Amino acid sequence: MHTKLCQLLGENYVLTGADRAKWLTDWTGGYTADPVAVLRPGNTAEVAGIMKIASAFGMPVVPVSGNTGLTGATSGNDMLMLSVDRLNQIEEVDAAGRTATVGAGVILSSLHAAADDQDMIFPLTFGARSSAMIGGVLGTNAGGSNVLRYGNTRDLCLGLEVVTADGQILDMMGKLHKDNSGLNLKHLIIGSEGTLGVITRAVMKLHPKPMAYATAMVAVPQLSDALDLLNQLQAATSNAVEAFEYMPATYIESHLKMFPDARAPFDDRYDVNILLEVGATAPRDALPGPDGAIPVQEQLTEILGQMLESGQLLDAVVAQNDTQRAEMWARREAAGEIAFHKKPFVNTDVAVGVTDVPAFLTRAEDGLAALDPDATSGVVAHLGDGNIHYTAYPSRQDAALNDAICEMVEDIIADLRGSFSAEHGVGTSKLRTMARRKDPATLAAMKAIKAALDPNGILNPGKMFPTS
């Protein structure tokens, strides 16, 4: 097999021994891999060739992009790891059609820059944008901070090219906004974490670049008040709110402790802190007036001022320049470092209806205290779409306690009819949860699809689909 792979790719792109080091640990440091070899194909034909060889030998293949996932989806031993990092061509940026055709190895920030050059944006963004790759964000259906306005990765993809387990190439690379010519295989592959096929290329949607942003930190009396704030802002701005992020006082304190040079968002401490951003694409909202004021910023300042006077807000700070805006975003984008700064931890990524966020957090805190009175927690949330990152820090390293905490969160999520995986995927970390909580009929249908597309089970085995 090794000889065939070297003949296909060239010896320099079949990595063994110490040459594999870059791929052996993921971003969290909690999941490791010990592959037979790391393969670095340079085009779709080579990916297809790899899968044909792997299929003939019955060898498992684990696709890997930027390795910034949080659920162990690229972990494993005694397999071939297929890196898409050389599939990094930005083939076309079509500003008129508002699309970009890219390889799976294109780094997210590189696509941001290419779109920016055409006065467009690719709106998907999150803290790991400088290392995450398009194949990975499609494989996990990543969300990020702008889902409120632009949707998840699935909503930002028009076309897809995929290599199947037996080396066939599925060409779904159209730029169509409408296509009812059969089952939507594209949407089936997106979010499947490399278990149904290897994504090699994609056509992604671009959006007009906002001409101006209005960004603010606000404090509200209660978390339940935040939804009223969001709805008022959406009504006033014609649904132009791009981000609405929740950071409790404990998060702010953790941020200041980890980054001592950072500033607090307000002079006073508040329990409920919200980062919000409005993007203006119309000249009437974005072009400075005679006095130099930017209308969208003036509008946001006026709205927040009225809400301060009425008592709906406790405090508000509107960014006056790009530096202040960047400071606000840096606070939010440090969430990954903050969440994993302390061990042991139990990391969850859940979604509930937007009106159920306060109930989830109250019940989760009560449940954690009942299981481990000395435990603490950390919270940050994409509040506008109901996605909560709830991290528990047990007082001791105890596998049974960790599992009990997971089950407690699962119970609340089930009662609220939410999801135990909002944007990070399943990988290996949520296999027990899948077995316990996924509707049996739904899980059986998923396994049937897996068996049909990957009958020998060689694509990212041991991920997403529980074995019992």
Image (tube, rainbow, N blue to C red):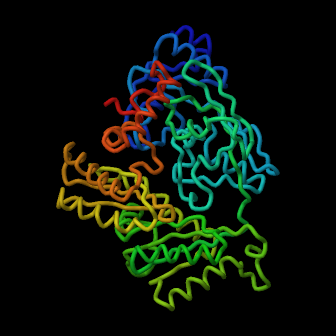
Instruction: Look at the image and tell me whether residue 25 can be seen.
Output: no
Q: For the point 69% across and 50% down, which residue is it?
A: 113
Q: Classify residue 247 by image quadrant.
A: bottom left
Image spot of residue 192 (x, y percent)? 51, 36
Instruction: Look at the image and tell me whether residue 28 can be seen.
Output: yes
Q: For the point 40% across and 38% down, which residue is it?
A: 441
Q: For the point 63% across and 69% down, which residue is it?
A: 239
Q: Is residue 7 left or right of residue 385?
A: right
Q: For the point 48% across and 11% down, which residue is it?
A: 57
Direction right: furthest residue: 96
Taking 300 as reference, is 99 above or below it?
above
Q: Classify residue 412 by image quadrant.
A: bottom left
Image spot of residue 195 (x, y percent)? 49, 30
Q: Is residue 292 left or right of residue 314?
A: right
Taking 41 as reference, is 225 above or below it?
below
Q: Is residue 280 left or right of residue 371?
A: right
Residue placed most toward the observer, 279 or 452: 452
Residue placed most toward the observer, 270 or 341: 270
